[in-house]
Every structure is written in structure tokens, then in C-alpha cells.
């Protein structure tokens, strides 16, 4: 087909105005000032441990108390990416909520809610999933780590970073406090927000990760310091839980894996087990690792473990008692989660309506007008 000069010019003009619109859209995405909003979540896969607390929850409380707009989710849909016993899952949801309250999350200052009560999370997840590729998801380090622990990889494990993106974007969050292990997942969230904005118009802010200080961003397992401390690790002695009794804490510290050198030195590369204990000690006391080593000259690792146990016992006991108090009031926890879901739902429904309309899933007056025009053409 031979195009006339006029037709060619017309196509070129159309093309350049489309490019210009795209550039303007992406520029608007970068410069538009979104109101500051924080979103983060925790999975009810077990009891909250020191890694969750120092890597994330402590920061959540600080942000809340600084008067920021904060939304925190009990990420129960994420937790079922690996098999959960239904009875335990339900009580874990209540226990994690009680623990968050005991740690200082205040339902009057934060929106604290259970993810599965808001259906828009999964609806937006599907929409975003259509904008990314399998290759991109397969490269995410947390997926590689978790899939290595199972024989048959469930689809949910593969897609969970997209659900995470939906969680964050549904509330148009600008800041996401996470442990260091989650930074790659946040890159996917940013990528999906940009793709959506470019394709459908300015809809989402590009959220930023707020990562805890690198020394605390990954507390290690007490039984295997090459791994992170984890709720779902089989061996409960691998982690200190907020709800551990003083006896549990002593037992776990005594059993913590160290090495054959007896003095107390801080060397995360060569002596990861001892360094992990020093890091925990430092997090609870605010002393830096060098000061701790200085204070404990002359102790061997066996006796130092008792010192660390005492520090942890002293700091955790009031928290443990608070958790117990909340657990004895299940109606109150239920009420907190109901209120949280009501508040979260208002924001989630607004965003989802906007997304549906932009993607073309929402039938509205404009769609009827288009329909009438095309009907006229047919007739
Ligand atoms: N060991 C850790 N050190 C520092 N931060 C950590 N986080 C988790 N483990 C450590 C941070 O805690 C927040 C909530 O975590 P999550 O429940 O959403 O999932 P996770 O990262 O997978 O935590 P777990 O405890 O290891 O759970 P399971 O065993 O279920 O996978 C996140 O911000 C995380 O970075």
C-alpha cells in the first residue's frame, strides 16, 4: 500500500503526540505530590519474633507516633502461600494482632486490619499480574529462597510479590517500612506502579522502601546464623518470640549456635553466631557492639549467653504480659479488626473503582455513550 505524503504526515503527527502524552504522563507520575502514607504488613505464620520486631514493627510504631498516616495489615492471604493448619492460622491472626497492640500499635492512630477482609486486594492483584512477566517474578530472591524449601512450588508463592504490590498500591502508599530482604519485592511494586501509570494514566505513587538500619535489618536464626530468623522455621529454638517466657528465653540463648573461640568479639563474617547475640544485645540496650565487647571482656561465650538472656528477659517480660492480657479479651481484638477493616475498605474501594474505570472494567455513563455511537454505526 502506498501512503500519500499527507497521510504519512498525519500518522507521524499522531505518533509524536502519543509519545508526548506518554512522556507527560510519566513526568507527572514523578512530580505529582502524593500525600505521605505508610503501608506495611506481617504474615500470621507464627508468633512474632525479634527479627520482625526490630526489622519492621519498631519502625511502624515510631511512624505512627510521629503522626504519620499509617496502615498495617495482618497479611493472612500471604500466609497461605505455604500450607497452614486452619486452627493455628486463626489463632495466629488473633495472636499477631494482640502482639502488635502490645508493641504499641494504637488502633486509633493506625489502620490495623486483616487483609482477607478486603476483597480489593485480590482484585487489584489480578489486574497487576496482567502487567508483568513470569521471568520477572522468577528472579525475585525471596521467591528463590522460599521455593527452594518445597518440592512442588505453589502458584501462590510465585505470585505473592504481585499481591504485595496490590496491598501497597491499593492504599496509594508512598512509604513502605520493610526488612532488607524485601527490597527486591519493592522494586517490583515500583515497576508495576510505573507500568500502570504509563498505560492507564496517573493512578499510583511510586512507593519508597524505608529499610531499618543495615545491622538490624536481618537478625539471624539462633540455630543456624547463615539463615534469617523466621517464624515458620521448624525449630522454635531458632528464634526468640515476643511471647516467650523467661525460661524459654534462657533455654534458647543457651542453645544458640556459636563457635569454638571463647572470647566475645564482634565479627559478623567470621563469627556470625556470636555477632547475632551481640546485635540482639545492642538492639535492646542501645549500646554499640564495641561497647558490649568491652563490657564483657573475660567472659566466655557460654557465660555471655546468660548475660544476653537476662537482657532479653527483662525487656520482653512486660510485652509478654501485655500480649496475654489482650489475648484474654478476644472480643476486643475482634472489634479492633472490624474497625480496621471498615477504615481500610473505604480507601480500597475508592482506588479499585478508579482502577476499574481506567482499565475499562467499570460500566458507567461514558460506556453507554460509546455503545450508542457504535450502535448507530451498525444501523
Ligand atoms: N530475621 C529478620 N530480621 C529483620 N527483619 C525481618 N523481617 C522478617 N524476618 C526478619 C521483617 O519482618 C516483617 C514482617 O515479616 P513477614 O511476616 O511479612 O514475612 P517474612 O519476612 O517472611 O518473616 P518471617 O518471620 O521469616 O515469616 P515466615 O517464616 O512466614 O516467612 C517484614 O518487613 C520483614 O522484612
Image (cartoon, helix red, strand yellow):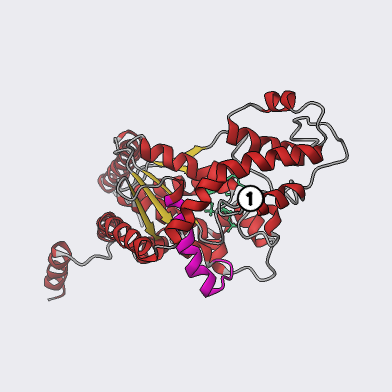
**Which residue corresponds to mark 1?**
246
Q: Nearer the viewer, residue 374 or 288?
A: 288
Residue 365 in which image quadrant: bottom left
Residue 121 x/y as whole percent = 38, 61
Residue shown at 75%/28% (left/top)? 296
Q: Nearer the viewer, residue 65 or 364?
A: 65
The reply, left or right, for residue 60 in relation to residue 203 is right
Residue 143 in which image quadrant: bottom right
Q: Is residue 201 above or below residue 341?
A: above
Q: Secondary structure at mark 1?
A: helix
Q: Is residue 205 above or below residue 241?
A: above
Membership of 22 in magenta stretch: no
The reply, left or right, for residue 376 in relation to residue 336 is left
Residue 216 x/y as whole percent = 60, 37
Span colored in magenta:
81-101
Q: How many marks overall? A: 1
Amino acid at each position: 500500500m502506498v501512503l500519500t505524503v499527507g497521510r504519512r504526515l498525519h500518522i507521524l503527527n499522531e505518533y509524536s503526540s502519543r509519545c508526548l502524552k506518554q512522556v507527560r504522563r510519566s513526568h507527572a507520575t514523578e512530580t505529582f505530590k502524593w500525600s505521605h502514607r505508610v503501608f506495611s504488613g506481617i504474615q500470621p505464620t507464627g508468633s512474632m519474633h525479634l527479627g520482625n520486631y526490630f526489622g519492621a514493627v519498631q519502625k511502624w510504631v515510631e511512624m505512627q507516633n510521629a503522626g504519620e498516616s499509617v496502615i498495617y495489615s495482618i497479611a493472612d492471604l500471604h500466609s497461605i502461600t505455604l500450607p497452614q493448619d486452619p486452627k493455628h492460622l486463626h489463632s495466629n491472626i488473633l495472636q499477631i494482632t494482640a502482639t502488635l497492640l502490645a508493641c504499641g500499635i494504637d488502633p486509633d492512630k493506625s489502620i490495623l486490619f486483616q487483609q482477607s477482609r478486603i476483597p480489593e486486594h485480590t482484585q487489584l492483584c489480578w489486574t497487576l499480574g496482567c502487567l508483568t512477566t513470569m521471568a520477572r517474578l522468577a528472579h525475585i530472591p525471596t521467591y528463590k529462597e522460599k521455593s527452594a524449601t518445597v518440592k512442588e512450588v505453589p502458584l501462590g508463592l510465585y505470585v505473592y510479590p504481585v499481591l504485595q504490590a496490590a496491598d501497597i498500591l491499593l492504599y496509594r502508599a508512598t512509604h513502605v517500612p520493610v526488612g532488607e530482604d524485601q527490597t527486591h519485592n519493592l522494586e517490583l511494586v515500583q515497576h508495576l506502579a510505573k507500568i500502570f501509570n504509563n498505560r492507564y494514566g496517573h493512578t499510583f505513587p511510586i512507593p519508597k522502601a524505608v529499610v531499618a538500619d543495615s545491622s538490624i535489618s536481618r537478625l539471624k536464626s539462633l540455630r543456624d546464623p547463615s539463615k534469617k530468623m523466621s517464624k515458620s522455621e521448624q525449630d522454635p529454638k531458632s528464634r526468640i518470640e515476643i511471647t516467650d517466657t523467661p525460661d524459654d528465653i534462657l533455654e534458647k540463648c543457651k542453645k544458640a549456635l556459636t563457635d569454638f573461640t571463647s572470647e566475645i568479639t564482634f565479627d559478623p563474617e567470621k563469627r556470625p553466631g556470636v555477632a547475632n547475640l551481640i546485635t540482639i544485645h545492642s538492639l535492646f540496650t542501645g549500646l554499640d557492639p564495641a561497647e558490649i565487647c568491652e563490657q564483657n571482656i573475660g567472659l566466655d561465650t557460654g557465660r555471655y549467653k546468660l548475660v544476653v538472656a537476662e537482657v532479653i528477659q527483662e525487656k520482653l517480660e512486660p510485652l509478654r504480659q501485655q500480649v496475654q492480657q489482650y489475648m484474654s479479651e478476644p472480643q476486643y481484638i475482634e472489634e479492633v479488626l472490624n474497625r480496621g477493616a471498615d477504615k481500610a475498605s473505604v480507601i480500597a474501594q475508592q482506588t479499585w473503582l478508579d482502577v476499574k474505570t481506567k482499565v475499562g472494567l467499570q460500566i458507567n455513563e461514558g460506556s453507554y455513550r460509546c455503545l450508542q455511537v457504535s450502535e448507530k454505526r451498525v444501523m
